[in-house]
Image: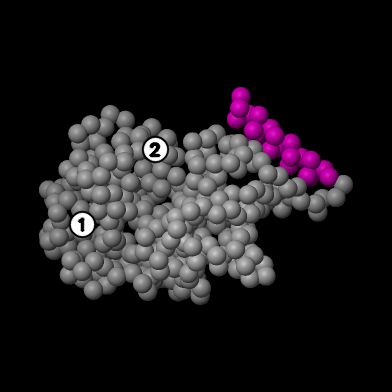
Amino acid sequence: MKTILQVFIFWLISVCVVYSQEPADVISSDTFSTAIDMFEVPAPMDITLTYDMKAFQRNKKEDEYVDVHFLYQFNDTLQIEHTLRIKPRGQFRNSYCSYAPFWLNIRKADVLNENLQEVKKFKVVTQCRGGKDYSDYVLKEYLAYKIYNLLSPVSFRVRLVHMKYIDTGRKNKLTESWGFLIEPEEMVAERNEAIVVKKDEISMRYMRTQELDVAAMFQYMIGNPDYSIAGRHNMKILGLPGFGAEGYTPVPYDFDFTGIVNAEYAIPGDNLGITSVRQRYYLGPCREDHEFQAAIDHIDSHRDEILELVSEFPYLNDKHKKEMIGYLDNYFNSASGPNFIKTKIRTTCR
């Protein structure tokens, strides 16, 4: 009943706008009532944040929320306005980036949506610094998430955002860039009837074999040497239905230090013996050959979808799409070779 009422309210607003005597008018609201799953909508969101950006960046290490004026242009006739709160997040990007990624806290935003009832905040990935290259990094990292969505339902969905920033500390200077929202882990858990596991130091041997192997091979495919299961570094852990001593499922995230993104600041760890994130390095557990092959085959079964996802993505230029496809093709061609497991995977498995 609650869902039906929410949809009706939103429909009623839309009807009023359509039949308004002044169709160019825009209805503004501080309450958003809809049953739409925002991560199922393919079109980018259009969000404007108004705040003192210079002060926010200056105090970004204080780990405190600041108020921002939030405007979401839902469509041509409806915009949602509210005062929300943001605070910087992340480790490397918080210290390196001119525009730190942030938490967007919606706890007091009056968002009437059954999909968001338990959600208090979103992770927002932003363009790290000015310039076209950094804009492209955001889009390529977004695609990395979308690729893993094709491989596993136990994954973080993302929603692309056309971000506008109005800097009150600089005479309302307008800056535009790309960003994306990451699905909160509570939503991932609910979709998969799972629980979020907060415990650190969970060994890889307690992970579900197939899910871990696919996640590890995916990380190898995109050239990610920056994760670990124990300690949950760039990896969340979920307990799916029936989980027990060997029933945990890893959920990877944070892909800017990958070969497929190829950010200028991304460097691999000193202990790996590689000099570039473009060099792949397998960090998953050692298995029997048939178990490795099962993960390889699973990813290969989605090869056409993965390459089409990149080639048809409208917001990245052809040069970068060609580079991404070339990097992925290099993996697929290598993985189909007779000695791939022996020479590329077994040499560095844990």
Instruction: Name the one closer to the observer, 294 or 194.
Output: 194
The answer to whether residue 241 is visible is yes
Among all residues in the image, which is located at the extreme top?
1
Give how far apart the Cα atoms at labels 2 and 1 are.
25 Å
Residue 3 x/y as whole percent: 60, 30
- Viewer-side residue, 244 vs 290: 244
**Could you say which quadrant of the image residue 89 lies in?**
bottom left
Q: Is residue 242 above or below residue 41?
A: above
- The residues colored magenta run 1-20
Name the side, left or right, on which 203 lies relative to 91: left
Viewer-closest of 106 and 36: 106
Considering the whole magenta stretch, tell me its main secondary structure: helix
Tell me the amino acid under the disc marked 2. Ala
Q: Nearer the viewer, residue 129 or 323?
A: 129
Q: Residue 153 location in percent, x, y?
A: 38, 43
Query: Looking at the rendered structure, which numbered label has been put on residue 178?
Result: none
Amino acid carrying label 1: it is: Leu
Q: Quadrant of the N terminus?
A: top right
Q: How many labels sit on residues? A: 2
> Which of the two discs, 2 and 1, labels the residue nearer the N terminus?
2
Residue neighbourhood size for the residue with mark 2, other residues' Cα within 10 Å, grouped as few (<14), some (14–19), many (≥20): many
Q: Is residue 6 magenta?
A: yes
Tag 1 secondary structure: loop
Q: Which residue is mark 2?
A: 189
- Asked if residue 144 lies left or right of residue 223, the reply is right
Is residue 170 depicted above or below 42 in this figure?
A: below
Q: Secondary structure at mark 2?
A: helix
Q: Residue at x 42, y 36 (%)?
A: 191
- Determine if residue 300 is in view: no
Q: Which mark is residue 283?
A: 1
